[in-house]
Image (cartoon, grey):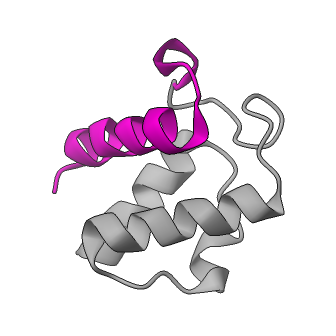
Amino acid sequence: MTKDEIYAELKRVLVSSFMLEEEDLVPEANLYTDLDFDSIDAIDLAAKIHSVTGRQMKPEQFKDVRTIEDAVNVIHKLLN
């Protein structure tokens, strides 16, 4: 998957699973301060990423993710 494809899929997951508005899902949006994520939401997102990619994400891979762009980069690295 390209980063653009990952971004599109991540937005779809965030809208459908976390009831976020698509217009708020810009690459620089901070998951915690802009989108009101908490640690449980982060774990849920990692599980959703696993279901979409088929790859298990280790907690240390996701711990530094702060923005949507960070998440896209981590997923891209996981897939390549």
**Seen in the image, is 55 located left or right of residue 16?**
left
Q: Position of residue 72 (x, y in %)?
A: 42, 51
Residue 8 lies, in percent from the top left, at 29, 36
Q: x%, y% of residue 30?
A: 71, 36
Please identify the quarter of the rendering in which residue 78 is found. bottom left
Does the stretch in magenta take in 5? Answer: yes
In this rendering, position of residue 17 left or right of residue 55: right
- Seen at 59% across and 30% down, the residue is 28
Query: Would you place residue 26 above or below residue 69 in this image?
Result: above
Q: Where the N terminus falls, by quadrant?
A: bottom left
Give the residue at x 35% y 70%. Answer: 51
Would you say the magenta stretch is mainly helix, strand or loop?
helix
- Magenta-tinted stretch: 1-25
Q: Quadrant of the C terminus?
A: bottom left
Could you say which quadrant of the image residue 34 lies in? Answer: top right
Q: Quadrant of residue 41?
A: bottom right
Q: Is residue 15 shown in magenta?
A: yes
- Front residue of this view, candidates 71 and 44: 44
* Residue 32 x %, y %: 79, 43
Residue drawn at x 54%, y 42% is: 68
Which residue is farthest left? 1
Total label count?
0
Q: Is residue 3 above or below residue 51?
A: above
Residue at left 42%, top 85%? 56
Single out the residue that lies furthest toward the top. Answer: 23
